[in-house]
Image (cartoon, rainbow, N blue to C red):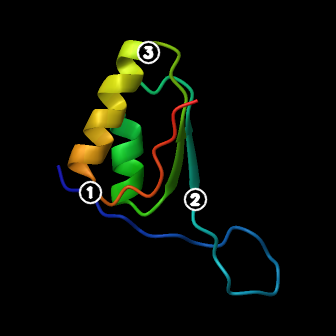
């Protein structure tokens, strides 16, 4: 199966050509797959995970698989 990213597009009828990058929210972050895919599709991602073990896994994975990941913040 092939997929094609159609990019960002404007959904409003406003008088501008500006397009804002999409924001992805993953309330069940797990191992960080959604964050990695978001990064690869040039989207911002906010990932929420309560399990500290998964937080460690996701942080390690994000830093190793996407070293230019701009901000991995654990709160």
| Residue 11 image point, x, y percent | 69, 67
Question: Disc 1 versus disc 3: distance between alpha carbons?
Answer: 34 Å
Question: Disc 2 versus disc 3: distance between alpha carbons?
Answer: 27 Å
Q: Quadrant of the C terminus?
A: top right
User: Which residue is labeled 3 in the image?
Assistant: 52
| Location of residue 4 with respect to 53 vertically, above or below | below
Looking at the image, which residue is at 26% across and 37% down?
Answer: 61
Looking at the image, which residue is at 58% across and 59% down?
Answer: 22
**Secondary structure at numbered mark 3:** helix
| Residue 55 image point, x, y percent | 41, 24
Looking at the image, which residue is at 76% across and 86% down?
Answer: 16
Answer with the quarter of the image where residue 17 lies.
bottom right
**Secondary structure at numbered mark 1:** loop
The numbered disc on residue 22 is 2
| Location of residue 2 with respect to 7 vertically, above or below | above
Q: Which numbered mark, 2 or 3, is in the foreground of this view?
A: 3
On the question of residue 72 being in view, the answer is yes
Answer with the quarter of the image where residue 2 lies.
bottom left
User: Which residue is labeled 1 in the image?
Assistant: 3
Q: Nearer the viewer, residue 74 or 15?
A: 74
Question: Disc 2 versus disc 1: distance between alpha carbons?
Answer: 18 Å
How crowded pointer 1 is (Cα within 10 Å; few <14, some 14-19, many 20+) is rated as few
Looking at the image, which residue is at 57% across and 27% down?
Answer: 27
Q: Which numbered mark, 2 or 1, is in the foreground of this view?
A: 2
| Location of residue 57 with respect to 43 vertically, above or below | above
Residue 20 left/right relative to 44: right
On the question of residue 31 being in view, the answer is no
Residue 37 left/right relative to 2: right
Q: Nearer the viewer, residue 33 or 72?
A: 72
| Residue 38 image point, x, y percent | 42, 51
């Amino acid at each position: 199966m092939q997929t094609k990213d159609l990019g960002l597009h404007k959904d409003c009828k406003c008088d501008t050509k500006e397009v804002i990058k999409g924001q992805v929210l993953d309330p069940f972050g797990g191992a960080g797959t959604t964050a990695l895919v978001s990064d690869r599709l040039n989207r911002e991602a906010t990932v929420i995970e309560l399990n500290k073990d998964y937080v460690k896994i996701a942080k390690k994975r994000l830093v190793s698989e996407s070293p230019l990941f701009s901000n991995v913040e654990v709160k």
